[in-house]
Amino acid sequence: MTLVAIVAALLALLFLGVPVAFALAGLGTIMLELKGLPLVMVAQNLHNALDSFVLIAVPLFLLMSNILLRGGVGRDLFDAVQSWVGHWPGGLGIAALLSCGIFSAISGSSVATAATVGTVAIPEMERRGYDRSFTLGMLAAGGTLGILIPPSIPLIVYGVITEESIGSLFLAGVGPGLLLIALFSAYGVFAARWDGKAEKLPPATWAERGRATLKATPTAGIAILMLGGIYSGAFTPTEAAAVGAVASLLVTALVLRTLTFRDFVAAVRATTVTTIVLFLIVIGAKIFGKAVTIYQVPAQLSQLVDTHVADPTLFIVIASLVLLFIGLFLESLSMLLIMVPVMLPTVLALGIDPIWFGVFFVLLIEVALITPPVGLNLFVIQAVARSPLGTVVRGVTPFVALMLLAVVLIVAVPQIVLFLPFGL
């Protein structure tokens, strides 16, 4: 009964329009007060929520994303990839997806990926005859790769919550990320052939490919520097974020010379605003998490599942349905901070690998990013293309189905996730 009352109260606050951070913190504070506990616990949790070296990576990755976004590196990436695959059937769509994958390996942000690549790819694809709804849907879905392909901000937060290795989580995200690129690309080729209106580009010359690739090399080098440093043990994910932020500033300001001082100030301002919002949610979730632990909600849920659900696969199905529903109303970080502490005891009790579960969770967060009414990538692409939201939603529907197919595949073949971090 307590579990139902807490969930009902939280949903009521969210539906009333209370910001997520204040809904979590406020409800948690009320729950502690009703237990007669000293409210100094709220202040203690406020401090403890952000007392983490790993969390420093979040604003640094955000700063790097905003610098690259303002520096206009999307054009160089898209031109380079397009020179190699643009002449294939559906080649511009594949180029856009591969550009999203490369930018994801730099930024760790879904919104930044969708905005950066979408700004360049959408006009080019439409000019070449690609269906508008398909184009917008592909770019909205391609942007979600930003939170799966490492480095990934949600995977960092998941690692903080569960105390799992960030490096292992990053490695685990590679296989599913490549799987999504393959599924999206295959559908892009099929859709382009089916529609028949998309213009097929002539193959670029080797000289053109060389020039385009050389121009994009400094940007791609940032991803190689960060990921190579993490996996070689040269620096931690947090240190990689700092290295990436400095490298992105040097590349855009000194090498490409596309970042002005005004752009840099705007990037810092945007990073500050987003960081404050995210950390307020982290604080609210910490207070709420302390309260639900005292009320033994995770234990009640685990007991409920143990009583009625003994099969890990059945639990995964139920968890998928719950997360898909919650994703209609909450953004990604809120889903992580609210649901992971509640689900994790059951995950461990059923013998489900927590690294695998983290990637599974992020895949479902990706679905939430492109499903109305709060799918952030839908609104990003809508703003970039100045298009009705319905056009974006129609285009993204097949990609939602492909993401759910990817979820089924990693459930059926867990090694897609676990091969890189743990081997066979």
Image: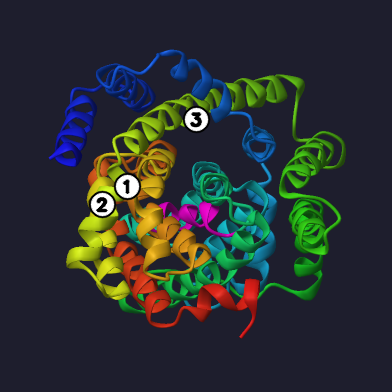
Q: Earlier in the sequence, mark 2 or mark 3?
A: 3
From mark 1 to mark 2, how far is it between C-alphas? Answer: 5 Å
* Segment colored magenta: 138-149
Residue for badge 1: 298
Task: Report the residue that reaches farthest toward the left.
Answer: 1
Secondary structure found at label 1 = helix
At label 3, which amino acid type do we have?
Answer: Leu
Between marks 3 and 1 in the image, the one whose residue lies nearer the viewer: 1
| Rendered position, 162 above or below 60 | below
From mark 3 to mark 1, how far is it between C-alphas? Answer: 24 Å
Task: Say whether residue 52 is magenta.
Answer: no
| Rendered position, 19 above or below 328 | above
Q: Which mark is residue 278?
A: 3
From mark 2 to mark 3, how far is it between C-alphas? Answer: 27 Å
Residue 348: percent from the left, percent from the top?
A: 43, 63
**Horizontal relation, residue 174 to residue 305: left or right:** right
Secondary structure found at label 2 = helix
**Badge 1 vs badge 2, beta-carbon distance below 8 Å:** yes
**Horizontal relation, residue 391 to residue 109: left or right:** left
Q: Which mark is residue 301?
A: 2
Residue 192: percent from the left, percent from the top?
A: 39, 73
Front residue (pair 199, 243):
243
At label 1, which amino acid type do we have?
Answer: Pro
At label 2, which amino acid type do we have?
Answer: Leu
Residue 297: percent from the left, percent from the top?
A: 28, 42
Residue 80: percent from the left, percent from the top?
A: 70, 62
Between marks 2 and 3 in the image, the one whose residue lies nearer the viewer: 2
Residue that appears at 77% across and 39% down: 242
